[in-house]
Image (spheres, rainbow, N blue to C red):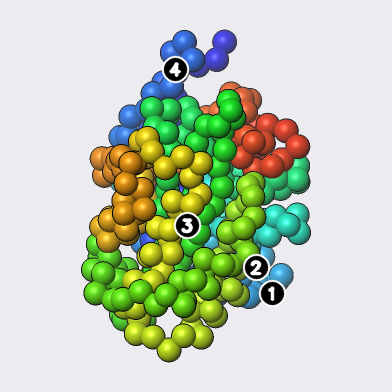
Amino acid sequence: MLKESYIVIGVMSGTSLDGVDLAHIHFSVIEGKWRYKFLESETIPYTEDWLNKLRTAVDFSQKELQQLNLDYTALLGNIIKDFIRRNNIKNLDAVCSHGHTILHQPQNGFTLQIGNLKEIAEIVGQTVVCDFRVQDVKLGGQGAPLVPIGDRILFAEYDYCLNLGGFSNISFEQDGKRIAFDISPVNTVLNFYANQLGLPYDDKGEIARSGETDMTLLEELDNLSYYQKTYPKSLGFEFVKTIVLPLMESYDLPIEDKMHTFIKHIAKQTAYALPERKGKMLVTGGGAYNTFLLECMQNYLTEMTIVVPDAKTLEYKEALIFGLLGVLKLRKEINVLSSVTGAKKDHSSGKCYKQN
C-alpha cells in the first residue's frame, strides 16, 4: 500500500548560480490528487571561490571534474545537513537533489550533474534521491527539461508554465501529451553583463530598460539555428559560452544596449515558442522579478494573462518539483515524460542512496 503523505527536502542549483535552493515540503496524494505545502525554504549563496569554479568548470579536464564532483558533493551535503539541523527537521522520507549541471551534451549521449555521488547520503544522514538526468540521456532523451511532469501534476490550471532561470523553459499540454523544451538563455546572459557592472543581477531590469534595441544584433540572435529546431530540445551553458556571448561581444555597444536587446530577444522567442498566444501562463524563476522582461513579453502576448505566483512558489518551484520527482521515484512511478525529452519511453529516473 503506497503512502499518502511524504515529507521531503527538494534541492536545486541552477545555471544562473544564485545559490542552492532548499525547500522543506509536505506532499499529500489523496485519490490521485497531489497537493503540496511549503514548510521551510532558503537559498544558500555560493562563495566567490565556488562561483569561479562553477563558471569555469566547463573547461576542466576529466581529472579536475572528478575532484570537483567530490568537493561539490561534500559542499552540497553539508549545506543540506546544516539546513536540517538549523530547522530541526525530523521524519524525512528523502532528500531529493538535482545537483549542479556542469556539462550537458545530450547529442553526444552525455550529461553531468555534480553533487550526486553516493557519499552525499552519508554526509546528510538521510535517504537521498538524485541524478535524475543521466538515465533519460541513456534512453535517447535530452535529459531535460524534467520539471514538466510537476507542471502537469501540480499546476494543471495553467495553459502554460514558463520558468525564467539561467535559461527559459516552457511546458504545456498538446493533444493529450505534455510538451516542453528550453526556449532561450535568460539569466546566464543578463547576469554576465550585470556582473561586468559590478552587480550580481539587474534589479527589476532597470539597467536593461535604460538601453536601446540594436536591431542588427536582435536579428542575428533571432536567426541562431537553435530557434529553428523543433522540440524536444534543450540548452546548456556551452551554447551561451560558444555561440551567444561571442556574438554579442562582437558588437561594440554599451552594456545597457546589449541587455536591452537581449531582453527583447527573450520576449520575442517566448512568444514564438507558444502554439497559441492566449490563455493563462504561470511565470516562475528569478527572471519573474525582471519587470522590464515581463512588460516586453506582455507586448508580444497581448491576449495572454501572465501570472506571477507567491514568492515561495516563484523562487522555489524547481526545488519543489525535484522534491516531487524524488517522491515519484520512491513510489516507482513515472517521473520523466518521453513526450518532453524525446526518450524511448516514459520512465522513473534517479538514483536512491540510503545511508549505511
In front: label 4 or label 2: 4
Q: Vertical placement of 290 versus 348: above or below?
A: below
Q: Amino acid at mark 2?
A: Leu
Residue pointed to by mark 3: 269
Please give the label number shown on residue 33.
4
Give the percent coordinates (x, y) of residue 356: 61, 38
Query: Do labels 4 and 3 touch, CB within 8 Å?
Result: no
Residue at x-position 71% and y-position 40%: 343
In front: label 3 or label 1: 3
Query: Do labels 1 and 2 touch, CB within 8 Å?
Result: yes
- Among the two numbered marks 4 and 2 on one chain, the one whose residue lies closer to the N terminus: 4
User: Dot 2 surroundings within 10 Å: few (below 14), some, or many (20 or more)?
Assistant: some
Please give the label number shown on residue 89.
none
Query: What's the CA distance linking mark 4 and mark 3?
Result: 34 Å
Q: Amino acid at mark 3?
A: Gln
Furthest residue in direction bottom, as rendered: 252
User: Dot 1 surroundings within 10 Å: few (below 14), some, or many (20 or more)?
Assistant: few
Query: What's the CA distance linking mark 1 and mark 4?
Result: 46 Å
Residue at x-position 49% and y-position 71%: 219
Name the residue nearer the viewer: 22 or 241: 241
Query: Do labels 3 and 2 touch, CB within 8 Å?
Result: no
Residue at x-position 44% and y-position 51%: 271
Hey, which quadrant is residue 9 in on the image? Answer: top left
Residue pointed to by mark 1: 61
Give the percent coordinates (x, y) of residue 2: 55, 15
- Among the two numbered marks 3 and 2 on one chain, the one whose residue lies closer to the N terminus: 2
